[in-house]
Each structure stands twice: as structure tokens, then as C-alpha cells.
Image: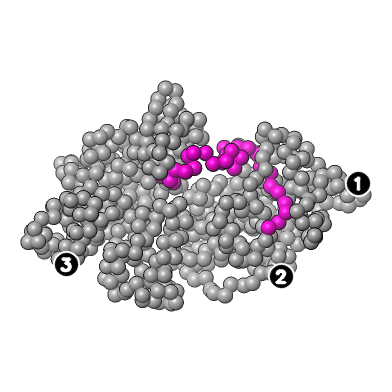
Amino acid sequence: MKAHTLHGQRLLRGQAPSYQRLQARLAEGHQPPHDAPQILHCGWGRLLLGHTFPDPESLARELLAEQPGKRDIALYVAAPQQVLAQAPQQLFLDPSDTLRLRFPDYRPARRAFRGFRIRRALSDADWQAVNQLYRCRDMLPVDQAAITPRHLGGPVYWLAEDERDGQVIGAVMGLNHQKAFDDPEGGSSLWCLAVDPQCSRPGVGEALVRHLVEHFMGRGLNYLDLSVLHDNRQAKSLYAKLGFRDLATFAVKRKNSINQTLFLGPGPEQSLNPYARIIVDEALRRGIEVQVDDAEGGLFSLSQGGRHIRCRESLCDLTSAVSMTLCQDKQLTHRALARVGIRQPAQRLAGSDATNAAFLAEHGSLVVKPVNGEQGQGVAVGLENMEDVQTAIANAEHFDSRVLLESCHLGLDLRVVVINFEVVAAAIRRPAEVVGDGQRTLRQLIERQSLRRQAATDGESRIPLDGETERTLRAAGYGYDDVLPIGTRLAVRRTANLHTGGVLEDVTVNLHPALAEASILAARTLDIPVVGLDLLVSAADQPDYVLIEANERVGLANHQPQPTAERFIDLLFPLSRT
């Protein structure tokens, strides 16, 4: 059986030294790397280096001292059963795998990563960007003031920054084990790797991992360890590609609400889509009873203190049938909002070719959409000739026999979420786009970007290879089989709907008061407690707008880290507010 070592302790593969053996080594005069157990503060919690603790009691005692809202991890635990036996009701064995890349096995990338740079997190703005990214990934934010300083062995955080706009699109934490605890084997580790789910740049995660590897190789270290959830196939595939292999060691954590799914296993709510699950998770956090009625349809019921409310994602019993109809029927929406002076596009039902042609001639460019539709289905934008208008009408009729023509307006697509007649979130939605690499065809680029969007949204977002995508490419002078030049960005859809690959940029703090007022007025006019308003604007901080649609079922998960689920549960169960 092949032997290997873990921080100076020689092991047989698949085995680990017991605390008794470690104590015996100490009694023989062998000293641990430091005189005291090593505890590193990472900003989101602490890393407890299990092999530096003299006995299971002291390690268990330190885990039980975890602070509320933090997540402590005891890694390199040789005999986890001895630690768990100290507090079996409060501790659990983390179902994650530990992987190791030995640097002699590492092979540099054969291609360059373009469009972003990697640098250290330095400023307050950097930490705000990191925390926004981590919240989007349901990770704990970092309190930079609580991090163990680097000169005392603390971690370093690295950022991936988009070269186009300076936005932080990825982050990772690295730990030098020699500095942290005088590791005799010269190791290092990677933690908290996250990539923006809206990122269109390929290879950000891989580049961050490689950067850490090459950074620590340059400092004479010998390997990089990491911990990954056992069922995270996408991450494991990347790590296997880079040469990581399983390491026979364990991690122990304390049972808390953050780790609940790890020690209880997936409940029925885990089969819900992200838009339902974000609400259910918040309800469970507050002790509200959840019953999943139809996971595939996103239907569930919430109960607390005799109050029972049914939901389909963010659509609930508090939304009346009349309000829902006013949103679904875009003609009714238009007339209701016009009566209170909200600015909207010109609109008419599609009719004869002659009347349609006259409407096109009057406005120059049209939008075609079904009267009753959602998720961007059957919508075509920027139609400037009758042939395209007729094709779009025929496509929209697959979703509703009644089809609307609207004047097309230029501007950014702004989604404003109003809950209980207050603006909770606002985001600019951008159409799906790809970045050329000078090698792949547009079809291949679209398929790759679509796979990334599907992975980032649990399958909720993808770029369809349909007639609308083909028409968008054709308008830009391209076809599916053309190769886009290196670095060239190309929008492949006209609409910014997330279900067809669009991405979001949070602009809540910059929203102009006039846009907030128009959105609240629209919600009150429709008398709907939860609604997403779509506006075309010149900029989020400017007052000009045209309101184009109201959506009765809002994808709250799309607006993290804004507290959309929290405000939704506040509305349903006001006594549960924390």
C-alpha cells in the first residue's frame, strides 16, 4: 500500500493517525509546528488545523465556540469519530472531499485567459465587491477586519477583474501553510472560490486556481489542497483536469443553520427551482413550516401561527385574480397604466397586413409580443421591415392567438422589483452576448455560453439557437458558422430576458427617484403586492423611462444580494421579522 504524508505525519493511504498516536509522539519529544493549536480567522469564520490540536476534546471545544453567523471548519482531522464523540448532537462530519495537487504534477495552461486580470483585494470597494459576489453564491460575506494578518500566517484574497469595466467577476482565498503553521511539507490551500453567475468571460475559475498554484510554486511550496462538496461535479471536473487527487483526511463542522443541508441531507424543498427555493430557505430560517405541493411547478405552502399561504414562486394568495389578469393581459396593463399617466410605448393589436404596415411606417421599428406570455417567449424586438414583422407575428401566435405590436424604444432594460409597494431591487438586464476567441464559430460560442448560464442558474437560463438568435446575428452581419474575432463582444439576442441567457447588473442604490415613483405607482394601480416592472431607460440614475411590462411572478433569486426573499416573507408573515 503506497504511503504518503500529511503535514509531517507519515500515513498509509486510507488511514490517519489517532490522537493517541499523536500524543505519544508528543510524549517522545516531537513538537507540533507551533506550541499552541493553530486557528486562523478568515473573515467568514475560522480554520482550525486539526493536526495541531493535542486531543479531540480541545478541538471539539474550539468548534463549539463558533460565533453566531460564522462558519468554522476543522480540517486535517485524522480521527473524526473521536471528535464527534465529544458532542454528537452539535458536530458533524462534513460530506466534502479534500483534494491535493502536488506541484510536480502541475502542467501550465496551453491557452491564455483573456478579458480579465487577477490581483489582490486591497480596498473597501474590493471587499464590497467580494461580498456581493459571495452572497450571489449563497456564501458567507467576509469581515476583512476579522482576518488574521498575513504576517501572522493569515490568508490572502485574490480577485478576477473584468478589463472592460473593472467589475469583480471572481474571487478566491489562498493560505500559505509555511507562514500559517510552519508546515514541514511546504503546503498551501485554496478556499472560497466563486465566479459571478452572470460572467460571460470563459475560464475565470480555472484562471484563479492556476494563479494560486503558480503563486505558491513561486514561493517554493510543494502542493495545494482544497475542499469541495462531494456532489459538485462541475468543480470536480475542473480540479481533475488540473491534476488534483483525493486526499485521505476529514473535516468536521458545527451544526448550524448555514450547514443544515449538509448534516440533514436534501429535503423536499431542494427539488424546487431557484426562484421557489430562495423563498423556502428564508421561510425555514424563520421557523415557518413548508410543504412542497408540486416541486416541478414551483408550488409550495407556508404555515405559521394559524396563517397558511400558498405560493408559486413569488406569486402567492395575496395577489388577487384581477391583479394577476391585469399583468398577464398586456392590453389591460397598458390601459390601466395609461389612465394614471405612466409613460408607455404606442400599442395596437396585430391586424391586416395593411394596418400592420401603417403602424410600422408610423414608428419605424416595432416590438412584437403575444398578449399573454412570459419569460420572453414569442417576443421579437427591433423589427424594421414587414417580412420580419409577419414572421414574428406567426411565431407569437404559438403562445397566444392575440398578438401585440408596440413602438420600439431605445434604452437599457431595467427591472424594478416592488414588494408591499416598496422598491426592493433594481437591475439593468443585458441581452446574452458572447466574446470571440478567433477560433470557435458563433454556434460553438453560444453553446458554451449557454452551458455556463445553465450551470449558474440550475438550468433556468439558456440561449436558444432559434430564429430570433439567427435574426440578431444576421442583423450584425454574422451567421452561426462565422468565427468572431478575438475580444469582439456580440449580443446574440435582442431581448434581455434571463430565461434566454440575459444577465443582470444590480443598480438598486443608483435608482433615480422618478423611476422608483413610477414603479410604485404602477404597483398601486395594478393593486399587486409583488411585481416586477420592466422599463426602458437611458440610465438607472436618470429620470427618463418608458414602462413596457408588468410581471406578476418575479424571479427573486435573480436579484441577490438584495433582500428580495426577506421582504417577501415579511409581507406574508410580518410577525416573523427578525
Q: Name which of mark 2 and mark 1 comes first in the sequence.
A: 1
Residue at the (27%, 67%) spot, across then down = 471
Label 1 to label 3: alpha-carbon separation: 87 Å
Residue type pointed to by label 2: Pro
Colour convention of the picture: one colour
Local SS, label 3: helix
**Which of these two is toward me, 36 or 404?**
404
Mark 1–mark 3 CB contact (< 8 Å): no
Local SS, label 1: helix
**Which of these two is toward me, 545 or 574?**
574
**Quick check: can you spot residue 564?**
no
Point out which mark residue 27 bears.
Answer: 1
Mark 3–mark 2 CB contact (< 8 Å): no
- Neighbourhood count class around disc 2 (C-alpha, 10 Å): few under 14, some 14–19, many 20 upward: few
Residue at the (91%, 46%) spot, across then down = 27
355 to the left or right of 452: left
Point out which mark residue 387 bears.
Answer: 3
Question: Closer to the observer: label 1 or label 3?
Answer: 3
On screen, 495 above or below 56?
below
Rendering coords of residue 11 (x, y %): 80, 55
Point out which mark residue 338 bears.
Answer: none
Rendering coords of residue 6 (x, y %): 77, 56
Rendering coords of residue 457 (x, y %): 44, 53
- Neighbourhood count class around disc 3 (C-alpha, 10 Å): few under 14, some 14–19, many 20 upward: few
* Residue picked out by circle 2: 104
Label 3 to label 2: alpha-carbon separation: 62 Å
- Neighbourhood count class around disc 1 (C-alpha, 10 Å): few under 14, some 14–19, many 20 upward: few
